Image (cartoon, helix red, strand yellow):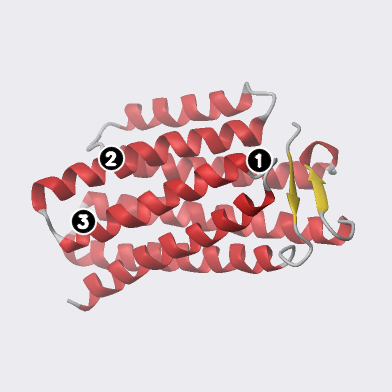
Amino acid sequence: MHYSYAIPHWFFGFDIGMEILFAIITCLVAVFAFKINKVTKERKIWLLGVAFLLMGLSYIFLGGINYWFAQIASEQFREVSIGEIQTVGIVGVYLYMILFTSGLVTLAYLTAGMKKGKTYYLLFGLSLLVIASSFYKLITFRILAVFLLSFIAYQYFDDYLKNKKKKEFWILLSFTILFLSSVCFIFSPVYYPAYIVGHLFELLAYIIMLVVLIKTVKK
């Protein structure tokens, strides 16, 4: 599984902190979603909580792996090759991809209004199959994330056009920004600023989502 990207010296380590922050924020989003679900008993809200919990766990593994990278990286621009790391690193990266993919599939499942477990099984299974059958697994994973997020953003765009509510607009904006972050990560192996911009987009997207849910709980 070969995948490499150049990270500027000044950002290497800072990105680990951001990934830990992503884990905290996404887990908080899950907590607030579960709190809202206790009141509304809405299945979509519960699934939203599950999706962000899975994504939060994925960032915990990613932050751990990048911390491990920091111990072996060279100076200046540090070239990280996933294909050359030890077994523990490979397992961590796979866990990150599986958990994040399961979170995105859950979001796509709920935004599409699907209710059958068989459909979820099919979506999740096909997503994992696409990644597992690819030689460039992380690149394929990023492309799959772009595809799923484009679908999720479109569904929220469609909801916004029907309801014209501020809440739907901000959720749409957060997933659109998250979509843009995934696009940036596709180009990160050849253009290192894309790696930085991708992290900043992720941070903004998750903050927006968290603020929306906090305001919903306070109402």
Q: CA distance from mark 2 to mark 3?
A: 12 Å
Mark 1 is on which residue type? Tyr
User: Which residue was labeled with disc 1?
Assistant: 94
Point 74% across, 62% down: residue: 12
The total number of labels drawn is 3
Residue kind at label 2, given as amino acid type: Tyr
The residue that appears at 64% across and 23% down in the rendered structure is 134
What's under tag 3, amino acid-wise? Glu
Secondary structure of the residue carrying tag 1 is helix
- Is disc 2 placed on a helix, strand or loop? helix
Q: Choose the circle earlier in sequence order: 2 or 3.
A: 2
45 versus 99 height, above or below: below
Which one is closest to the eye, mark 2 or mark 1? 2
Which of pointers 3 and 1 indicates the residue nearer the eye? 3
Q: For residue 165, what is the image quadrant?
A: bottom left
Q: Residue 209: percent from the left, percent from the top?
A: 35, 63
The mark found on residue 154 in the picture is: 2
Q: Pointer 3: what residue?
A: 168
